[in-house]
Amino acid sequence: MDDKKIIFSGVQPSGNLTLGNYLGAIRNWAKLQKDYHCIYAMMDMHTITVRQTPADIRRRTLEVLALYIACGIDPEENILFVQSHNPNHAELAWVLNCYTYMGEMQRMTQFKDKSARHADNINTGLFTYPVLMAADILLYGADYVPVGKDQMQHIEICRDIAGRFNAIYGDVFKIPEGLLSKSGAKIMSLQEPTKKMSKSDENPKAYISMMDDMNVVAKKIKSAVTDSEGVIEYRPDDESKAGINNLISIMSAVTGKTPEEIAGDYASAGYGTFKADVAEAVVEVLAPIRAEYDRLIADKAYLKDICASGAQRARAISQRTLNKVYKKVGFLQL
């Protein structure tokens, strides 16, 4: 066994993955596979805290897998699997629920946010899903979990639960760390640029879906909200420039230039010219991914083979952790 560290992460197959998901997360995952053992999941068990159409979950699970591969994540080098194909996640989550306190769950900001948005369905799963997330991570002895700043609270609760269990039973779980990508871009809504771009946004013009036709991608960028000032400057702390700041951030993420360099390049340009160039740069990045995705999604048998192989590999690793946990808490072993 080599000394590479282990990475675990995943995306929920609910809604269409966005340009923000790609630039902020999935693109970086492909880079990490060179230096780490990477385990990436389609987190379908997490999706049902909010009511879903069953057929949509099934379809989107394969779509997310195809996108992972199209974005450069190698299914041979990495473990790619569907969360619900490995029952060890649910089994460990139950044990960890018994070592997690109500007060800890009540402090989770995402529970508060989702409860406000789904007031007619504040279910127990919505309340306890950070415990399932902790199980996801701890099952594989993950050293690092690539996350955005808004997810760091989940890493902290995972570390707290693991530390509490270890204090009682000894060195059972590896304590993971959140991995904030230096190159990860936070992409905002094209229509409300003070909000993060979200695949669950009710306004389809607000986000760029990885499923969008390239003409649609260009059109959405060209209709993005800006301001009346007409000056292309990067002022990240100025909310009145949120729209232009967002477009500059997108251009920076797809070209590799700094926001300051881009602002300098377009100092004398109009918004129309800049938007057209941003659209062209984004399409140049997304078009080959979309072409590879179209090829992969047409081969459902191949994708299901990857799911089966990934689940088998995931179960083999996670079963060792679960067996150790069950022994520690006193469950009779057969």
Image (tube, grey):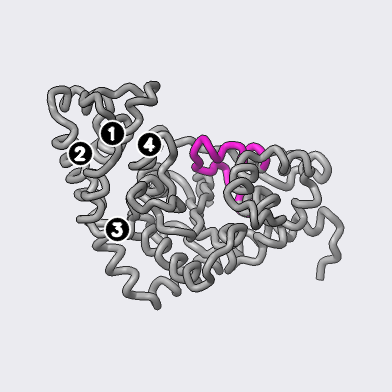
Pick the residue in front: 75 or 320. Answer: 75
Left or right: where 154 falls relative to 1 = right
Res 262 → quadrant:
top left
> What is the distance, in whole Å, between disc 1 and disc 3 at their CAs?
22 Å
Quadrant assignment, res 333: bottom right
Identify the amino acid type marked 3.
Asp
Per the image, label 4 sits on a secondary structure element best described as loop
Q: Earlier in the sequence, mark 2 or mark 1?
A: 1
Residue position marked by numbered label 2 in the rendering: 275
**Number of numbered markers:** 4
Q: Which residue is label 1 attached to?
A: 226
Q: Residue furthest front?
A: 228
* Neighbour tally class for label 1: few under 14, some 14-19, many 20 plus, Cα within 10 Å: many
Residue at figure coordinates x 20%, y 43% from the top left = 281
Q: Secondary structure at mark 1?
A: loop
Amino acid on which the number 1 mark rests in the picture: Thr
- Residue linked to disc 3: 212
Report x, y in % for residue 294: 28, 67
Of the image marks 4 and 2, the number of the one nearer the N terminus: 4
Task: Name the quadrant containing residue 211.
Answer: bottom left
Q: Do the numbered discs 2 and 1 sit on residues whose CB atoms are within 8 Å? A: yes
Task: Specify whether residue 287 is painted magenta.
Answer: no
* Number of the label disc, if any, that sits on residue 193: 4
- Give the Cα separation between the discs numbered 4 and 2: 15 Å
Is 307 above or below relative to 271?
below
Give the residue at x 70% y 37%.
107
